[in-house]
Image (cartoon, rainbow, N blue to C red):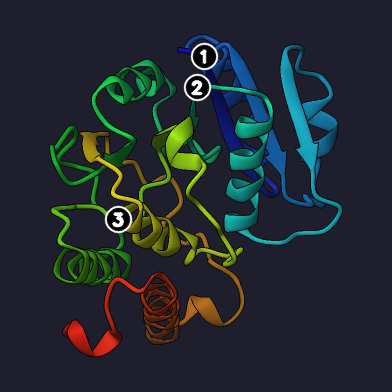
């Protein structure tokens, strides 16, 4: 199976080189989607041989980086795609494991809550509560059995990517992925990955830094995705 490994990045100069050098130990074809970085990220990327880069002229959002990665995998004729973040919170050594599970499922999603790797690692309480609430929506409204709604460490079969029509370019983008995956009847499994938080103060940016606003925004995106898919109406799920 020919796999593309892609990392969406935005102003990751502090971790970029270390993470990508690790990724090179476990992946062949590597793509970095630079979402309009304004720090030294573009300069550092030029120093890495064997890493392809697609750069957005302006910052569009986390979901935009993943959408570009989806398109690149399809246009490149790859059989599958692995995505991970470049902030040091995902373990590149697990890339082959996630990719190998594409033999049994269309979408493999990392979960930081299936297994405790390091008891000293704890997520920021606010983020954990929001993740738990959104995960509950997905399970109750879509009939899933997930433990982690927002892990960016994932693997997708090509056939799965062909079903996605992503319009949310921000952090709510995974909600569209989940709804569209269920609408397409894709098989989904979770794979345990370590919970790592290196910078608990890292912000989402703008109004999303307010937890109440962020949760309400996620709900709006989720309900719109449900309506668009025809799977259910928002009234059919407990908010």
Q: Are marks 1 and 2 in contact (CB under 8 Å)?
A: yes
The local secondary structure at tag 3 comes to helix
Q: Compare residues 169 and 44 and report the one nearer the observer.
A: 169
Which residue occupies 50% across, 22% down? 79
Q: Is residue 143 left or right of residue 9?
A: left
Q: Between disc 2 and disc 3, whose residue precedes?
A: 2
Mark 1 surroundings within 10 Å by alpha-carbon count, few (fewer than 14), some (14 through 19), many (20 or more)? few
Residue on which disc 1 sits = 2
Query: Quadrant where the N terminus lies?
Result: top left
Which residue occupies 44% across, 63% down? 176
Q: Is residue 220 left or right of residue 239?
A: right
Q: Between disc 1 and disc 2, whose residue precedes?
A: 1
Which residue occupies 14% across, 70% down? 140
Quarter of the image holding residue 205? bottom right
Spatial CA distance of label 3 from label 1 is 25 Å
Q: Compare residues 124 and 147 and report the one nearer the observer.
A: 147
Quarter of the image holding residue 170? bottom right
């Amino acid at each position: 199976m020919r796999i593309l490994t892609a990392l969406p990045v935005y102003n990751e100069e502090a971790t970029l080189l270390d993470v990508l050098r690790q990724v090179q130990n476990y992946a062949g074809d590597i793509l970095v989607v630079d979402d309009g970085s304004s720090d030294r990220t573009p300069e550092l990327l030029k120093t890495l041989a064997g890493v392809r880069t697609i750069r957005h002229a302006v910052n569009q959002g986390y979901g935009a980086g993943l959408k570009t990665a989806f398109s690149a995998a399809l246009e490149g004729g790859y059989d599958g795609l692995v995505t991970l973040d470049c902030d040091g919170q995902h373990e590149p050594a697990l890339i082959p494991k996630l990719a190998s599970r594409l033999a049994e499922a269309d979408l493999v999603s990392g979960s930081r809550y299936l297994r405790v790797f390091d008891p000293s690692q704890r997520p920021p309480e606010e983020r954990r509560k929001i993740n738990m609430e959104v995960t509950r929506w997905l399970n109750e409204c879509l009939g899933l059995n997930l433990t982690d709604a927002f892990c960016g460490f994932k693997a997708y079969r090509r056939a799965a990517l062909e079903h996605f029509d992503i319009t949310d370019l921000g952090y709510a983008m995974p909600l569209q992925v989940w709804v569209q995956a269920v609408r397409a009847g894709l098989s989904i499994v979770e794979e345990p990955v370590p919970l790592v938080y290196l910078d608990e103060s890292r912000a989402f940016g703008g109004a999303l830094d307010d937890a109440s606003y962020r949760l309400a925004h996620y709900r709006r995106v989720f309900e719109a995705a449900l309506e668009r898919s025809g799977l259910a109406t928002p009234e059919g799920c407990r908010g």
